[in-house]
Amino acid sequence: MNRALHVRKIHEYLFEIPPHGKMRVPARLYLDERSLRELMENQSSEEWNALKQLENVACLPEIVKAAMAMADVHPGYGFPIGGAAAFDPEDGGVISVAGVGFDINCGVRCLRTHLTRRDLTGKEEKLADTMFEVIPAGLGSTGELKLSTKEIDRVLREGARYAVRLGYGREDDLEYIEEHGCLSDADPSVVSHTAKQRQMAQVGTLGSGNHYVEVQVVDQIYNTRAAKAFGLELGQIVIMLHTGSRALGHQIGTDYLPFLEKATRKYGIEVPDRELVCAPIESPEGQQYFRAVMAGANCAFANRQVLAHLVRQAFWKALRVPDTAIETLYEVAHNTVKWEVHEVNGERRRLLVHRKGSTRAFGPGRPELPERYRAVGQPVLVGGTMGTASYILVGTEQGMRETFGTALHGAGRAKSRRQAKRQYPAERIIEELRKQGIIVRAHGKASVSEEAPGAYKDVEHVVEVMCNAGIVARVARLRPIVCLKG
Amino acid sequence: MPYEYLDHEADIGLEATGASLEEALRDGVRGLLALLVDPETVEPRQAAPVQATASDPGSLFVALLNAVLAAVDLHGMFFRDFELTHLEQVDDHWVVEGTLWGEPIDLNRHAVEIEVKAATYGGLLAEENEAGWRLRCVLDL
């Protein structure tokens, strides 16, 4: 179909597809004309077309306001990646597997250090080798923490708190994790034994694909007030860590896909794509899936907490940097479903917000934010590629009004993995990055070539679009120095 | 081609074809195994059983691929090959059983490619045509 006929420009950085067919609300895209054109042209298949996926989301029961896509939007399964949708529990609003994804609560932890770029000069290789040795990554790797299923249940109930209790990291880390690293609605009893068994050796592992640990330097500050609140300065070393709930989260998704498919039939919900199976939030099935997702989310919180500890260990081992010199700046996820209160048409409503490959980006004043940041807004962590910048942005009032406080999560893929693999041999990419002063260590070749900088959209451009749209504002830009891949 | 990978910006599409549903399912699993690790580096020394149940051939394909992914973690093994031993439609559901052949994970020897998080219902297709069966889904990477 010719989608271009349907698309309406609201302003330079926001486009809308008005409801047509079975859409209940419009689809809204934070893009400029160039990226909209690219999105319409650069689609490998109508079966997994991001615009079609967004229109499909707009068909789900009791979706509020719009199905939204951020500037990093690209095709996913069911939901597009870079998508967000909120549902009203009254009158049958739904919870959906595809709105969360299989990597439940996948997210980013940012650690700020007391080090400057100069402190690392000449020691980059040593640090990279130590990180490679200390941090388990890649398919088939196992963590040093081997847990029983009983202990896994505590991970699922207590999240990052349990990891701290076991000696991984510090109490003050928890203050700066979304939800303090623990969701109280989690219920380990609705998570399968298979899911728990798969996770026993995977707590504290990075995974592969787009997951990474990256040592970066702050090379631009845009907003001194927010930067001061976040504890950021020019030339400072920070560390970004990107991973999720590992096999446990994947298995929860796998188990609940057929479960919710039955519920979809039971409640007579029409879904335009089978992957969009869902259940009314207030139904027993919807509630059960929600409690399982919360358990999966806690697993991701614990996983990142253990990995943050391993990062500190690597810095101590390689450079004798004490762990007190590495503090959690913030941790926020981008594959989530959460209860949040938002104002819609002048009315405060409790909504279930799905974010699939998009980040919570709350503006100033929200009670969910740590006190230190509350006056300026939430740090929004945007991962670039191994060869390009990453950003720390801040949420805005306008974002609260327009997108339920949601923004982009990364650069967003532009090329398929197969294309990237053909075009960017791993050895060549590693060598090219080395010449630019970026040290890469990877366990699997595919993680390098498929994640090559050229496979992604231009991070500068997607950040610019979201900032110009007023949804977020720039605080700092970060340049990669050392990157560990799975 | 018994199996084929399809372009997808974030993930990857997997399509398997066969003269029968058994063949298509088997080759789909082989396609998945080859994504994880170079099969040439894995010796087929030990067997691991795998089983899946679903309401129709499409969701059976997804359930089988997910059972294979779980087997990697549960047994701590990589696999080189898969044999389908049993396929049956009982009342309103389908059952598939098979054997995975491989060995315990040895990261010094096994050429690891990429982790597949799960098989999804995204782009799901299961169709019987003159040539046999065609199965397709998106794998979350």
Image (cartoon, coloured by chain):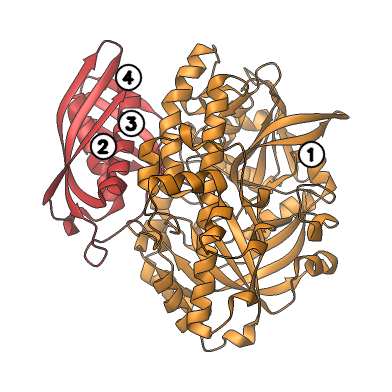
Chain colours: A orange, B red
- Residue A247 appears left or right of B70: right
Residue A383 placement (x, y as % from top left): 60, 59
The residue under label 2 is B28
- CA gap between label 2 and label 4 equals 16 Å
Q: How many marks?
A: 4
Mark 4 chain: B
- Residue A164 appears left or right of A261: right
The residue under label 1 is A402
| Secondary structure of residue under mark 2 | helix
Q: Residues within 10 Å of mark 4 (few under 14, many from 20)?
A: some
| Secondary structure of residue under mark 1 | helix
The answer to whether residue A356 of the structure is visible from this angle is: no
Give the residue type that dot 3 points to: Ala
Residues tagged by mark 1 and mark 3 found on one chain of the structure:
no
Residue A117 placement (x, y as % from top left): 63, 83
Q: Are marks 1 and 3 in contact (CB under 8 Å)?
A: no
- CA gap between label 2 and label 1 equals 43 Å
Residue A173 placement (x, y as % from top left): 64, 62
Give the residue type that dot 1 points to: Glu
The part of the image, by quadrant, that contains residue A99 is top right
Q: Residues within 10 Å of mark 1 (few under 14, many from 20)?
A: some
Observer-nearest of A1 and B99? B99
- Residue A39 appears left or right of A218: left
Task: Give the residue drawn at x 71%, y 27%.
Answer: A26
